[in-house]
């Protein structure tokens, strides 16, 4: 099959591309940057999803599109998030229609349903919150709704996946932040440390995308829906972080701040940064404080039922691989 992946240079996108290639697909990567290493394996198109004409041209001849592109991070100007997440997704849908693409798989996020409260074992019936704590969650929710609503238009079948905290060897976001702050002794536990959180190992996230794609067509039960996917075993977030720090031989966490204080500091820092340094991400935000202190894990029974999703790698095995990968790079 001819497959195009937006955000193909990212952690999920590149891992997905490699697996699809192994499975015998003809894979094209679309991204805003050049990727010399990936060019050796894939046809790479340097383009921005915000540019409709470039997107239409890139999708010529494609049969399947995995739309993983998004602005990484939770801080920035609303316009930037809106243009990439919402307008970009609108352009992808338009280009799919223009080029008679049959399948569109959108990588969403559980953050689309996350507000200020604990989420404990919720399924896909959970509502969107009345208010979002960051632009990322809000614009991803807007894009997700568009993708679901476009199912069945111009013979296009669509589905949305909500992988939570994708992690593993090569992760450019989660582990590097933990390591950097631990080394500088700036890692502070937020809250009581009893919050349960879902994660999804990179191999599991890739497999979920491939499995739902195989099942997707206009008459399938997955068409026009969204699904939570995870490692199917929520972890005690701060206990897991402590375990990783210990295995990486890094300083343990010695400082603690309550959720209420962290949330208040987030309000103050967000206000300050918006006025004086809008391009720099605050050390604490309301969203980050809530993510670090509240529980957020989900019921993935529907993904198991509708497209046979089952995690391939356990948290224990994934952690072992993560630690081994970390030390292998220290020796380079």
Image: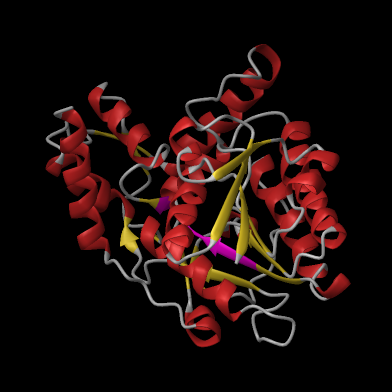
Image vertical order of residue 224 relative to residue 291, above or below: below
Res 279 → quadrant: top right
Query: Left or right: 300 with respect to 150?
Result: left
Quarter of the image with the C terminus is top left
Q: Position of residue 197 (x, y in %)?
A: 40, 59
Name the residue at 13% across, 42% down.
246
Image vertical order of residue 47 relative to residue 312, above or below: above
Q: Which residues are magenta?
A: 160-166
Res 205 → quadrant: bottom left
Name the residue at 21% across, 43% down.
325
Residue 97: say if magenta: no
Query: Left or right: 234 with respect to 222?
Result: left
Q: Position of residue 107 (x, y in %)?
A: 60, 57
- Asked if residue 123 can be seen in this view, the reply is no
Residue 164: say if magenta: yes
Res 130 → quadrant: bottom right
Name the residue at 63% across, 14% down.
277
Image vertical order of residue 275 relative to residue 87, above or below: above
94 or 38, nearer to the observer:
38
Q: Position of residue 23 (x, y in %)?
A: 44, 66
Q: How many marks?
A: 0
69 or 116, nearer to the observer:
69
Q: Main secondary structure of the magenta part?
A: strand
Query: Left or right: 14 with respect to 176?
Result: right
- Asked if residue 37 can be seen in this view, the reply is yes
Image vertical order of residue 162 relative to residue 50, above or below: below
Q: Position of residue 313 (x, y in %)?
A: 29, 66
1 or 85, nearer to the observer:
1
């Amino acid at each position: 099959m001819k497959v195009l992946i937006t955000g193909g240079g990212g952690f999920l996108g590149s891992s997905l591309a490699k697996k699809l290639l192994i499975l015998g697909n003809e894979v094209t990567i679309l991204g805003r940057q050049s990727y010399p290493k990936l060019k050796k394996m894939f046809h790479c198109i340097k383009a921005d999803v915000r540019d409709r004409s470039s997107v239409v041209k890139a999708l010529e001849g494609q049969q399947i599109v995995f739309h993983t592109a998004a602005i990484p991070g939770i801080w920035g100007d609303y316009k930037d998030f809106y243009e990439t997440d919402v307008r970009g997704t609108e352009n992808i849908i338009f280009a799919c229609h223009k080029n008679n693409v049959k399948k569109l798989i959108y990588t969403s996020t559980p953050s689309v349903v996350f507000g200020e409260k604990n989420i404990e074992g919720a399924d896909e019936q959970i509502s969107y919150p009345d208010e979002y704590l960051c632009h990322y969650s809000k614009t991803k929710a807007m894009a997700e709704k568009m993708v679901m609503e476009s199912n069945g238009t111009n013979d296009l079948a669509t589905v949305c996946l909500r992988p939570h905290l994708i992690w593993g060897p090569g992760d450019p976001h989660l582990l590097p932040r933990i390591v950097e702050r631990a080394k500088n002794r700036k890692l502070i536990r937020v809250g009581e440390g009893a919050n349960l959180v879902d994660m999804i190992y990179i191999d599991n996230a890739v497999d979920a995308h491939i499995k739902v794609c195989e099942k997707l067509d206009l008459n399938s039960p997955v068409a026009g829906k969204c699904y939570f996917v995870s490692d199917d075993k929520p972890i005690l977030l701060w206990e897991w972080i402590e375990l990783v720090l210990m295995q990486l031989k890094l300083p343990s966490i010695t400082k603690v701040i309550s959720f209420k204080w962290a949330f208040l500091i987030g309000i103050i820092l967000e206000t300050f940064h918006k006025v004086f340094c809008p391009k720099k991400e605050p050390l604490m935000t309301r969203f980050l404080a809530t993510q670090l202190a509240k529980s957020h894990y989900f019921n993935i029974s529907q993904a198991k039922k509708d497209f046979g999703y089952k995690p391939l790698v356990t948290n224990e095995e994934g952690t072992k691989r993560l630690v081994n990968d970390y030390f292998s790079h220290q020796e380079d």
